[in-house]
Image (tube, helix red, strand yellow):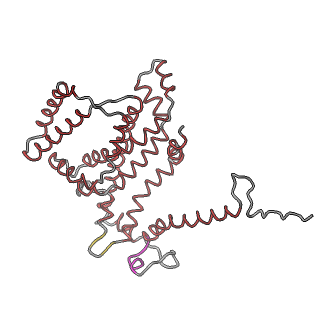
């Protein structure tokens, strides 16, 4: 009787849930190659920030102290040169102020809105929504075309809408639900910013708010709020309703339940959403290009401005981009455990 050949351990699986050594080796090779593809642009950015202009212009040089001699030329010019220091410091602090404040307000408003959409039932009538939009358009035309002060037009339009909704508005029957409202909010992100930047510019121009932090903060809140509402709805949906009902039985109010029970349970999701919103606000370019000026310029605009008449200043661009991404990477590292839990909430729900 011939002996059966033993299976090669290199190709055999110990159990169905563990791949064979061969496939593990293949997967590690693929992952290693993909890691190089993903991380190489970051490596190229770092080494370019420490190159002299001549080292950048004379072709690709990859290894410091072998292909080229590292230099702090770009950093000294951007941070310590008397003529350049101010135009780097101001946009950097502008970016921090606008991105952080707008992201905090987006999370606060988005958490309230998403919780309300999960726990309350809304049935606004379509006719009233259309009427409100029509009156808003009419008010905008009156302000921009006829030059009437918005302080006069706004209370008049509000009064007309209240009268209309309490009389003719009662005849409207068709309404929308919470799901429709949530989908409408997230659909606002489908519209590209370049399609709405001109009306926003004209609005702030008439309000005298161009080149102000408030204009950028309000605009970023409106642009990023749909993302926060959409994400936080899933996190709040994963919180058992019985927990809130138990608090209500003990005499807690709706606000106490929200701030003392729901928000602490949703911390991982809130932090993950905050970081996503912060990145969007931190890197935003189109809206900042139209709404900001010399006093409120942000870092993305400063990076683009390094494409001068002599061509792109790649060494300065690389150093500025490193300054931009360093705080985001630091925040992501500090909050890593919360972010990982928050991003997995929707994956394990149900």
Q: Which residues are magenta?
A: 50-57
The quadrant in which residue 129 appears is top left
Farthest residue to the bottom: give it: 58
Q: Position of residue 321 (x, y in %)?
A: 39, 62
Within the magenta stretch, is there residue 53? yes
Farthest residue to the right: give it: 1
Prevailing secondary structure class for the magenta stretch in the rendered image: helix
Judge left or right: residue 86 versus residue 260: left
Q: Nearer the viewer, residue 182 or 44?
A: 182
> Dividing the image into 4 quarters, which one contains the N terminus?
bottom right
Q: Residue at x 28, y 47 (%)?
A: 219
Is residue 284 positioned above or below 309 on the image? above
Q: Position of residue 18 (x, y in %)?
A: 69, 54
The quadrant in which residue 110 appears is top left
Within the magenta stretch, is there residue 159? no
> Dividing the image into 4 quarters, which one contains the C terminus?
top right
């Amino acid at each position: 009787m011939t002996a059966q050949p033993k299976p090669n351990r290199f190709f055999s699986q110990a159990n169905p849930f563990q791949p064979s050594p061969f496939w593990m080796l293949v997967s590690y090779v693929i992952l290693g190659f993909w890691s190089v593809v993903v991380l190489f642009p970051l490596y190229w950015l770092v080494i370019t920030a420490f190159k002299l202009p001549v080292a950048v212009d004379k072709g690709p040089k990859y290894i410091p102290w072998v292909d080229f001699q590292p230099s702090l030329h770009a950093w000294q010019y951007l941070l310590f040169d008397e003529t350049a220091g101010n135009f780097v410091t101001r946009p950097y602090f502008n970016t921090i102020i606008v991105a952080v404040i707008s992201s905090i307000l987006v999370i606060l408003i988005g958490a309230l809105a998403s919780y309300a959409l999960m726990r309350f039932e809304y049935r606004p009538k379509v006719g009233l929504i259309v009427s409100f939009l029509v009156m808003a358009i009419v008010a905008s035309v009156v302000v921009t075309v006829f030059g009437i002060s918005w302080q006069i037009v706004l209370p008049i339009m509000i009064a007309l809408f209240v009268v209309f909704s309490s009389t003719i508005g009662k005849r409207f029957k068709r309404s929308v639900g919470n799901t429709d409202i949530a989908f409408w909010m997230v659909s606002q992100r489908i519209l590209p910013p370049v399609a709405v930047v001109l009306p926003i510019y004209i609005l702030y121009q008439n309000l005298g708010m161009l080149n102000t932090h408030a204009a950028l903060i309000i605009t970023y809140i409106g642009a990023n709020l749909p993302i926060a509402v959409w994400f936080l709805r899933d996190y709040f949906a994963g919180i058992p309703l019985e927990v809130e009902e138990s608090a209500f039985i003990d005499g807690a109010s709706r606000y106490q339940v929200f701030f003392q029970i729901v928000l602490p349970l949703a911390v991982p999701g809130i932090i993950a959403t905050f970081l996503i919103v912060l990145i969007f606000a931190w890197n935003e370019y189109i809206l900042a290009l139209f709404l900001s000026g010399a006093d409120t310029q942000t870092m993305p605009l400063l990076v683009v401005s390094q494409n001068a008449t002599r061509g792109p200043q790649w060494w300065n661009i690389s150093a500025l981009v490193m300054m931009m991404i360093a705080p985001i990477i630091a925040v992501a590292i500090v909050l890593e455990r919360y972010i990982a839990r928050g991003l997995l909430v929707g994956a394990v729900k149900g």
